[in-house]
Image (spheres, helix red, strand yellow):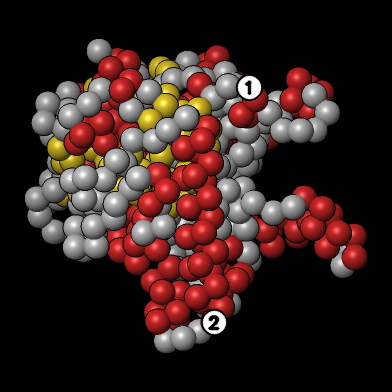
Amino acid sequence: MKVLVLNCGSSSLKYQLFDMEKESVLGKGLVERIGIEGSLLKHSPAQGDKVTKERDIPNHKVAVQLVLEALLSKEHGVLESLEELTAVGHRVVHGGEDFTASVIINDEVMKAIDKCCAFAPLHNPANLTGIRAMKEILPEIPQVAVFDTAFHQTAPNYAYMYGVPYEYYSEYGMRRYGFHGTSHRYVADRAAVMLGKKPEELNIVTCHLGNGSSIAAVKHGKSVDTSMGFTPLPGILMGTRCGDVDCSLVLQVMQDQKIAPEDMAQILNKKSGVQGISGISSDLRDVEDGAAQGDPRAKLALDMLCYGIRKYIGSYAAAMNGVDAVVFTAGIGENSALIREMVCKELGFLGAVFDKDKNRVRGEEAIISTESSKVALMIVPTNEELVIARDTRELVS
Ligand code: ADP
């Protein structure tokens, strides 16, 4: 069975074609600058050279057409014919309360995804555009939606509600939804496999640390809390997002400096976080370099990030009444030995014993605590595309 996984952004489209017999990637690529001058497609077959095609790509339909052309191409293609393609899996950011798991897409599902556009105005419309484009081009192929929010739908109401008038929830759906659910689910499951246990036997804190970051409490295989909220803005310090702040600060800045809501949103989403604190970059590698050279604001950004992560680990240990494993994933979690060390060496109160030598790895599955550690400290590279492909296979089989 061959499954195509699509992740559509507002001006980009990422894809991976899976052979589900071996769960191997046959080819993958990226369309960039859709609807913008200088649009292009980069395609990498599993075997053979990468190719870049510069084309006029005015919309997602043309982008999808170009992807299919690349997959079928005589020179660098990976499919003989489109008949080999069994299904398409889409990453969809927001499923609201309607979706607690992945689903086969039909008209009703598309309407529900459309309804959630209000919650994720940057992402859901783009995800829908990809679904519609695929439906137009290949109407007979089943399509599946895999939601970033679905995994967190198992959280109890006292964890997802905010202390504002109840009607905000009952009338407008304002509550914590959480994101990166596909990643948290994957790494928690992998961690259980690595520890030789069933997910139901474990309490795990999963730390997805990338440009956007979130932490989740996964109790017995189910998410019971997570650091992102109604939007992907709260939680720990991120590349350019502020993480947790006192709402009154935001109100006062808007009032005193006469800042409009959309401008304030831009400041909190794009000019804050590691970028805003360090004044150097949103890329953690640059900030680590700055701190190593003695820049005090770079050091402050790293300290704030690691302190925030530790606080969430501690609070989720309390939320789950104990923790068996802490998992690091995504760009920073998989690659930054420094951040893992700064976080893990202060987790002794949990009975966790960090092993500095084992931490000298990058981008591979590893246990970075000692044998005697009461809590397993782990690195698990995430693979959201594989989860999407697996859910798609399961639903269409
Ligand atoms: P996204 O949220 O865009 O998917 P990623 O998961 O790719 O992000 O993570 C991007 C982050 O990972 C960036 O801040 C980058 O600096 C960081 N990162 C990648 N490699 C390293 C490394 N070797 N050391 C420290 N940080 C790294």
At a point 48% along the width and 68% down the height, the residue shown is 302
Q: CA distance from mark 2 to mark 1?
A: 41 Å
The disc at residue 281 is none
At a point 36% along the width and 55% down the height, the residue shown is 344
Dot 2 and dot 1 residues touching (CB under 8 Å) = no
The disc at residue 157 is 1
**Left or right: 268 with respect to 137?**
right
- Quarter-wise, where is residue 174 in the image? top right
Residue lying at the far bottom of the rendered structure: 293
Q: Is residue 235 above or below residue 130?
A: below
Please tell me which of labels 2 and 1 falls first in the chain. 1
Q: Secondary structure at mark 1?
A: helix
Q: As shown in the figure, which amino acid type bears the numbered disc 1?
A: Asn
Q: Is residue 239 above or below residue 387?
A: below
Badge 2: residue crowd in 10 Å (few <14, some 14–19, many ≥20): few
Q: Nearer the viewer, residue 122 or 350?
A: 350
At a point 53% along the width and 55% down the height, the residue shown is 308
Q: Secondary structure at mark 2?
A: helix
Q: As shown in the figure, which amino acid type bears the numbered disc 2?
A: Pro
Q: Is residue 133 visible?
A: no
Q: Is residue 335 visible?
A: yes
Residue at the disc numbered 2:
296
At a point 86% along the width and 59% down the height, the residue shown is 252
- Quarter-wise, where is residue 336 in the image? bottom left
